Amino acid sequence: MTLSTTSTTVNYNAVPDETGRFGPYGGKYVPETLMPALDELEEAYLNARVDKEFMAELAHLQHTYVGRPTPLSYARRLSEELGGARIYLKREDLAHSGAHKINNALGQALLMKRKMGKTRIVAETGAGQHGVATATAAALLGIGCIVYMGTVDMERQKPNVFRMQLLGTEVRAVDSGSQTLKDAINEAIRDWVTNVESTHYLLGSALGPHPYPAMVRDFQSIIGLEAHSQMQDPAEGGPGRLPDAIVACVGGGSNAIGIFHPFLEEESVRLIGVEAGGHGIEDGAHAARFADPERGRLGVLQGTKSYVLQDGDGQIALTHSISAGLDYASVGPEHAWLRDVGRSEYTYCTDAQTLKGFKALCELEGIIPALESAHAIGYVLELAPQMAKDQVILVNLSGRGDKDLGTVMQTIGGDS
Amino acid sequence: MRGVERIEQVFRNLNKAGAAAFMPYHAMGYPDRQQSLDVIAALAEAGADLVEIGIPHSDPLADGPTIQTATYAALVGGTTVADCLRMVRELRDQGVDTPFCAMSYYNPILAFGEERFANAAAEAGIDGLIVPDLPPGESELLEPACRAAGLATIYMLAPTSTEDRIKSVARHATGFIYLVSVTGITGARDELPPGLPAFVERVRRHTDLPLAVGFGISTGPQAARVSEIVEGVIVGSALVKAAGSEAGVDAVRSLAAQLAAGSRGG
């Protein structure tokens, strides 16, 4: 596909540089033991990207196994109800295993299988979607897999724990620290450091040390590439034009960077990331790295330099979100850079507003979204009415909500 | 004398005696503020040649369960970076003159301010700095700040390190090089890895700096075996565990004496 280029002073394809930096962000902040593994991964990935056979095999699996391309749906009733811009949904919830996470998991698992002499995968998971996607890819390709998951997350995402186990993956409970995603990543890295000769760490978001942020972005960019073409093609359900705004939720930020990246040079398209506002910024119980001027500052967490929620002493803050997948103290380094250069903007959606988005999509469109994706919808409830009827919003509906039924029932009650 | 020179002197003096330096680690603020001061004074008394001063971080991804638990308890107890430096100053004022290396992760130092940290650490009585998640190449601000403050910049190498990585660490390191004995995290292990002598030899080809081995060493006999091939023996988790036991400082004193004797060749 060729993207139309407009005049721009920022070269979006020049990041990351060879040291893995997006401006001041990114890098490789890991123990020495892992440095050779990162070099090896980078080499394997750069090699695979230009290997026609590898890319053809990946494309074949994306089509015949994942079910790509995922559809573009016009959210007619939601658009009419809000009375503003027309809203289109990129349906990553319809990808096999229920979320965009499979795009990256399958890419990395195939990379490991075909290009690296390793036999074992470790991964972390918060909401369980990345864990399920990794377990799925591991089963498909016949690779042993261990997923680390915080005990708090295991409790709130029980169905996904069982799914991973059914798929032949061992789920290891992590009860250190806050017992959520951050701690699961620490534990996955500790396993990786210990077993690095045999093991690939299949990191699930556009985070961590170089080359992960770039590699995960590239595996997820298929979302934006498909949407770019579908939006312009009425036969594919599109409005026959590019959107005025793209909205995606941002935890680590892989679904957002995946849909944003192919639109970076389309300067007419606003790119809006929605962070987890939890109980609100002033309350402190949230995961909105960009929205909290006091605690969201430049920092290093788990291998990468970015915006990190932390206290004045550099200790990582505990976060809160109704969605386990956004409950993380740092954000992908490319998002921090895109924000600095003014290309993307970030806002947040509270738990309460998210539940409104969740219900709206259920009742008006017949789609039960993941609570992560419901953050994007929750923000669109506010954005769409401010826009004109001839304008268009594209939302990345990054996952389906089956896994969240327990949480939602507890929060709003089964009868409401 | 600058910190880096005090550390160099440790190894010069030992070379004369033909033994390795005993280099214990302790987490500041564990089990509590006063006891951590007592532990470090006891380590110095028991013959430590250099003490690693652990500054706790919420996300210690290179550490095993023992040090994770200890540093977490220290944070819960309110230990801050500034307080760790105050404790170092108190130890110096009490007359503890063993060289100290601060050991922390990058984010607390970044939050403190790299230059400000290097100066404050040197002023408090720290002689060198080890940051496990800051390999050469990422330390372009901290390394010059440490040099200006007279602190040794200590980097780690692992059995997985390639020749290029070894050369890079050899170029950037001062004081000594910290060899991670195994691919893994900190914590006591029963056996020393069989590949250790070969790993040490690979590193020697590229540097004349003293080498110290850490991760997994917990007993006097293990320390004795390590002292046969390198100039420094680093012990962390086993001593931290002792510090948290019922016998506390007494347990530390007795284990440290065995480890110090082992480091000097049994």
Image (cartoon, grey):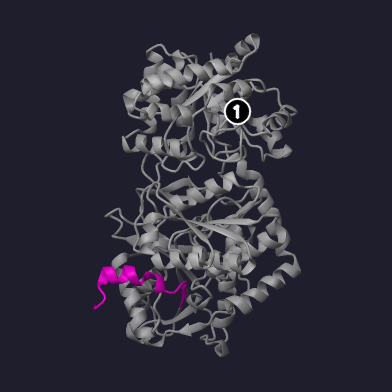
B114 or A332: nearer the eye? A332
The residue indicated by pointer 1 is B213
In the image, A67: left or right of A386? right
**Secondary structure of the residue carrying numbered label 1:** strand
x and y, in percent, of residue A56 in the image: 71, 73
What is the quadrant of residue A387 in the picture? bottom left
Q: Would you identify the image quadrant in which residue A215 lies? A: bottom right
Q: Which residue is drawn at 59% across and 38% down?
A: B135
Image quarter for residue B222? top right
Image side of residue B213 versus residue A297, left or right: right
Which residue does the image show at 27% across and 68% down from the upper left?
Answer: A411
A397 part of magenta stretch: yes
Q: For mark 1, name the chain.
A: B
**Image-based side of A380 in relation to B197, left or right:** left
Give, as a single range, the part of the protein colored magenta: A394-416
Depth check, front residue: A275 or B261: B261
Residue A113 appearing in the image? yes
What x and y, as percent, mark residue A153?
39, 59
- Relative to the observer, which residue lies in front, A38 or A123? A123
Residue A7, above or below A303 = below
